[in-house]
Image (spheres, grey):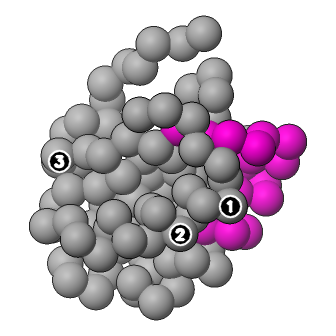
Amino acid sequence: MALINIRSAIKQVQLIVRKLEPPQGVEILTYKRNRGVTIIKIDEENLSVQERGYEEQSFQVSMDDLGKLLKTIAKREFPRSRKVRVYQLDSPYCLGIKRKQI
Protein backbone atom coordinates (compact mmCIF):
# COMPACT_ATOMS: atom_id res chain seq x y z
CA MET A 1 0.00 0.00 0.00
CA ALA A 2 1.13 3.56 -0.55
CA LEU A 3 2.31 5.92 2.13
CA ILE A 4 -0.52 7.40 4.20
CA ASN A 5 -0.59 10.43 6.48
CA ILE A 6 -0.22 9.19 10.05
CA ARG A 7 -3.26 11.11 11.36
CA SER A 8 -5.58 9.65 8.77
CA ALA A 9 -3.92 6.22 9.07
CA ILE A 10 -5.15 5.77 12.64
CA LYS A 11 -8.74 6.48 11.61
CA GLN A 12 -8.46 4.25 8.53
CA VAL A 13 -6.99 1.40 10.58
CA GLN A 14 -9.90 1.59 13.01
CA LEU A 15 -12.37 1.32 10.12
CA ILE A 16 -10.46 -1.52 8.48
CA VAL A 17 -10.18 -3.52 11.72
CA ARG A 18 -13.93 -3.29 12.34
CA LYS A 19 -14.59 -4.91 8.94
CA LEU A 20 -12.06 -7.75 9.32
CA GLU A 21 -12.91 -11.32 10.21
CA PRO A 22 -10.91 -12.99 13.01
CA PRO A 23 -7.90 -13.79 12.83
CA GLN A 24 -7.12 -11.20 10.15
CA GLY A 25 -5.15 -8.09 11.01
CA VAL A 26 -3.42 -4.88 9.98
CA GLU A 27 0.24 -3.88 10.11
CA ILE A 28 1.44 -0.26 10.32
CA LEU A 29 5.09 0.27 9.39
CA THR A 30 7.47 3.19 9.06
CA TYR A 31 8.84 4.25 5.69
CA LYS A 32 11.92 2.03 6.16
CA ARG A 33 9.78 -0.81 7.58
CA ASN A 34 12.05 -1.21 10.61
CA ARG A 35 9.46 -0.27 13.28
CA GLY A 36 5.79 -1.01 13.41
CA VAL A 37 2.55 -1.97 15.07
CA THR A 38 0.57 -5.12 14.34
CA ILE A 39 -3.13 -5.45 15.15
CA ILE A 40 -4.73 -8.92 15.06
CA LYS A 41 -8.47 -9.33 15.55
CA ILE A 42 -9.06 -12.11 18.11
CA ASP A 43 -12.85 -11.91 18.12
CA GLU A 44 -15.50 -9.29 17.44
CA GLU A 45 -14.56 -7.11 20.43
CA ASN A 46 -10.97 -8.01 21.38
CA LEU A 47 -7.73 -7.21 19.62
CA SER A 48 -4.10 -8.16 20.09
CA VAL A 49 -1.73 -5.23 19.49
CA GLN A 50 2.02 -5.82 19.17
CA GLU A 51 4.49 -2.96 19.21
CA ARG A 52 7.88 -3.55 17.56
CA GLY A 53 10.54 -0.89 17.46
CA TYR A 54 11.90 1.25 20.26
CA GLU A 55 9.90 -0.90 22.69
CA GLU A 56 8.65 -4.48 22.34
CA GLN A 57 5.22 -4.79 23.95
CA SER A 58 1.98 -6.70 23.51
CA PHE A 59 -1.47 -5.45 24.49
CA GLN A 60 -4.96 -6.95 24.64
CA VAL A 61 -7.52 -4.19 24.05
CA SER A 62 -11.15 -3.80 23.14
CA MET A 63 -12.29 -2.23 19.89
CA ASP A 64 -13.23 1.00 21.72
CA ASP A 65 -9.76 1.47 23.27
CA LEU A 66 -7.84 0.93 20.01
CA GLY A 67 -7.75 4.58 18.93
CA LYS A 68 -6.29 5.86 22.18
CA LEU A 69 -3.67 3.08 22.28
CA LEU A 70 -2.64 3.69 18.66
CA LYS A 71 -2.15 7.39 19.32
CA THR A 72 0.19 6.74 22.25
CA ILE A 73 2.12 4.05 20.35
CA ALA A 74 2.39 6.30 17.28
CA LYS A 75 3.95 9.08 19.35
CA ARG A 76 6.53 6.64 20.69
CA GLU A 77 7.27 4.57 17.57
CA PHE A 78 6.80 7.18 14.83
CA PRO A 79 7.99 10.41 16.51
CA ARG A 80 9.21 12.18 13.36
CA SER A 81 7.19 10.30 10.78
CA ARG A 82 4.48 12.05 8.83
CA LYS A 83 3.69 9.09 6.59
CA VAL A 84 3.36 5.36 7.37
CA ARG A 85 2.67 2.18 5.42
CA VAL A 86 -0.46 0.12 6.16
CA TYR A 87 -0.75 -3.53 5.14
CA GLN A 88 -3.66 -5.89 5.63
CA LEU A 89 -2.81 -9.36 6.97
CA ASP A 90 -4.86 -12.41 6.03
CA SER A 91 -3.74 -14.34 9.11
CA PRO A 92 -1.29 -14.03 12.03
CA TYR A 93 1.09 -16.31 10.11
CA CYS A 94 1.78 -13.43 7.69
CA LEU A 95 3.72 -11.61 10.44
CA GLY A 96 7.00 -13.34 9.60
CA ILE A 97 7.05 -12.13 6.01
CA LYS A 98 9.95 -9.78 5.38
CA ARG A 99 8.96 -6.70 3.47
CA LYS A 100 11.34 -4.96 1.09
CA GLN A 101 13.54 -2.53 2.99
CA ILE A 102 14.74 0.72 1.50
Q: Which residues are magenta?
A: 70-85
Q: Residues within 10 Å of mark 2 (few under 14, many from 20)?
A: few
Q: Which residue type does callout 1 highlight? A: Arg
Residue under label 2: 11
Residue under label 3: 91
Q: Report whether residue 56 is seen.
A: no
Q: Which residue type does callout 3 highlight? A: Ser
Q: Residues within 10 Å of mark 1 (few under 14, many from 20)?
A: few
Q: Report whether residue 6 is seen.
A: yes
Residue 7 is tagged as: 1
In reply to whether residue 36 is colored magenta, the answer given is no
Q: Are marks 2 and 1 in contact (CB under 8 Å)?
A: yes
Q: Which residue type does callout 2 highlight? A: Lys
Label 2 and label 1: CA atoms lie apart by 7 Å
Q: Is residue 84 left or right of residue 74?
A: left
In reply to whether residue 71 is colored magenta, the answer given is yes
Q: Residues within 10 Å of mark 3 (few under 14, many from 20)?
A: some
Residue 58 spot, x, y in % from top left:
50, 61
Residue 17 is tagged as: none
Label 2 and label 3: CA atoms lie apart by 22 Å
